[in-house]
Each structure stands twice: as C-alpha cells, then as structure tokens.
Amino acid sequence: MDERVDNLVLAARAAVLSDLQARRLATAQAVSVLEEACSSRQWWAEQWPEGGIYVAGLVAQDVQDALFESTDRWPLCLSCESGPLHSLYISPDLGGPDPVWICEETGHVAAALGFLSER
C-alpha cells in the first residue's frame, strides 16, 4: 500500500466526517457510505497517483450522491432564507484541489470541505 494514498484517503475521510457531524448526519448508514467511498477512492488513487489532489472532493461527492439516493439531500444550504430547500455542492467539479461547498442557488462559498458549520 502507498502511504501517500493512505494519508490522502484518511484526510478525506476526516473532512467529510467532520461535515457529516456538523450537520448531525454522522449516522451508522452515513459513516458506512463514507467508508465505502474511501475504499473506492483509495483504489482509484492507487491507479492514478497524479489524481491525489482530487480524492477529498471526490469522496465528498460520492457520499453526497449515495445519501441522496438513499435518504435525502446533504448538505443543505443553511444560508438562504427564502426559496426551496437546496443543497451545497463541491467545487471544482472534479473535487480538487482545495474543494469547497458552494450554494447551488447563489454560487457563494459556504465553507471549505471539512469546515461546514451547524448553521
């Protein structure tokens, strides 16, 4: 195993788990989804070492997609007070470098990955 890839995946796991906890969604199901995403992206990063800068954002996107399919939208935008409920999404689209959560309605940065707040 590549220690660099292990560190990238562990950092991605920590960032996404922090965001899940901030929004009170670190359930057994969500953490299981996170573990699966990390495992998948570990293999991916081992196959394409130059893609390491994308791992964290891609793990976040994988978790977001899986949760949307099984439960609901995550993470919700908490900044917009009017209009329908809507999600944040990871930018840049490929997930790196330096992924951030963006409001899908306004395009404003809500937080860096790993730094979502409860409000």
Image (cartoon, rainbow, N blue to C red):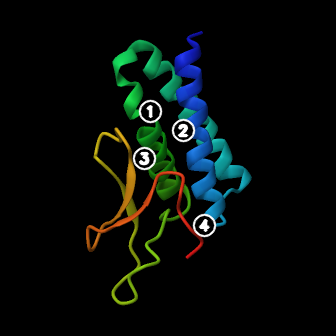
| Label 1 CA crowd tier, 10 Å (few <14, some 14–19, many 20+) | many
Residue 25 place in picture, x, y as percent: 64, 62
Residue that label 3 marks = 61
User: Badge 3: how crowded within 10 Å, few (<14), some, or many (20+)?
Assistant: many
The amino acid sitting under disc 2 is: Ala
| CB under 8 Å between discs 3 and 4 | no
Disc 2 target residue? 12
x and y, in percent, of residue 55 in the image: 44, 33
Q: Which quadrant is home to the C terminus?
A: bottom right
**Mark 2 near mark 1, Cβ–Cβ under 8 Å?**
yes
Give the crowd class for mark 2: few <14, some 14-19, many >=20 residues within 10 Å: many
Residue denoted by label 1:
55
Quarter containing the N terminus: top right
Which quadrant holds residue 98? Answer: top left
Label 4 Cα crowd, 10 Å radius (few <14 / some 14-19 / many 20+): some
Q: Is residue 32 above or below residue 109?
A: above
Gap in Å between the C-alphas at discs 3 and 4?
A: 16 Å
Secondary structure beneath dot 4 equals loop
Of tags 3 and 2, the one toward the viewer is 2
Q: Residue at x 59, y 15 (%)?
A: 3
